Image (spheres, rainbow, N blue to C red):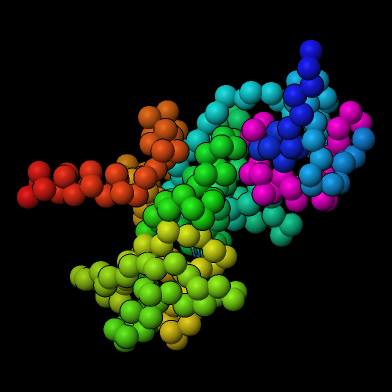
Amino acid sequence: MEANMERLQKIIAEAGITSRRKAEKLIVEGRVAVNGRTVTAVGSKADPARDKICVDGRPLTRNPRRVTVLLNKPDGYISTVSDPQHRPTVLSLLRGVKERLYPVGRLDYHSTGLLLLTNDGELAHFLMSPSSGIPRTYHVKLPGNPKPEDLRKLENGIVLDGRPTAPCSIRPLTGRGKPWYEITLVEGRYHQVRRMFERIGQPVLKLKRVRIAFLTERGLPPGGFRLLPLKEVERLKRWNPAIERSSDENRNAKIA
Ligand code: URA
């Protein structure tokens, strides 16, 4: 049989352990072994059919059942697989799910709302790549009403970590006590929403993710989750902002 060499981070991601980016970190940290030998070079390759690949001493399962879950994260849960401070993780909420899933991106400890968890490396890779253009919508509670020119500044993009943020949209939400705003981003940088509002002197008091692409929290109480059917997973993987926008417009036109 001819060897079918693939990059280790791809093999690990496809086995559902973690995303490709995090798999690279596992390799660098010396937690990956191929045929009993620790490998620390990120470009290393192996043959998934013939080599014995272990992460933290546990052999990879080949072709696990692909599972993707949509969770409505409550406040006070950390969205990593483990926490050195022993705070509860979002994984502890997935009762009855036997597959090893990992969160796609993060919600801060005090943020609430929608979080996807999966063992589908292809889906995670797509969702986390900046070019996927998947919109994520957040509701934020602010201490006061920002000036319109400050909101325009955020919408047009500000420099974070030396790079401009992509254009986004922000609108006020009416009918609540303190000012609440809705912001839709097509990228997910570290603490991005909090850092953006901080920049205009409006530290976020509450933050909830209410939409990821076409997924909403409908029917999901805080702490609740549901398995995504294949149809929804495929729709995410084929996400095309232009097509989705025009189908939304058609739907709205029918309702009107
Ligand atoms: N942006 C943030 O700042 N925090 C989150 O939890 C999500 C997006």
Residue depicted at 23% across the width and 47% down the height: 246
The residue furthest top is: 1
> In percent of the image, x 69 and y 23: which residue is there?
62
Residue furthest right as drawn: 37
Q: Is residue 227 visible?
A: yes
Q: Residue 133, percent across and down?
A: 43, 53
Q: Where is residue 129? Give x, y as percent.
A: 54, 51
Relative to 160, is 250 above or below? above
**Quarter of the image where one finds residue 36:** top right
Q: Please tell me which residue lies in front, 99 or 159.
A: 159
Q: Residue 30 in magenta?
A: yes
Q: Tag count in the figure?
A: 0
Q: Residue furthest front?
A: 2
Q: Is residue 251 above or below residue 192?
A: above
Q: Quadrant of the N terminus?
A: top right
Q: Is residue 21 left or right of residue 68?
A: right
The residue drawn where x is 43% and y is 74% is 157
Report x, y in % for residue 13. Answer: 66, 38
Q: Is residue 223 visible?
A: no
Where residue 150 appears, x then y in whole percent? 36, 84
Front in this rendered view, residue 216 or 238: 238
The answer to whether residue 244 is left or right of residue 100 is left
Q: Is residue 3 left or right of residue 67?
A: right
* Magenta stretch encompasses residue 131: no
Which contiguous range is marked in magenta? 14-36
Name the residue: 76% across, 37% down: 8
| Left or right, residue 177 beside residue 38 | left
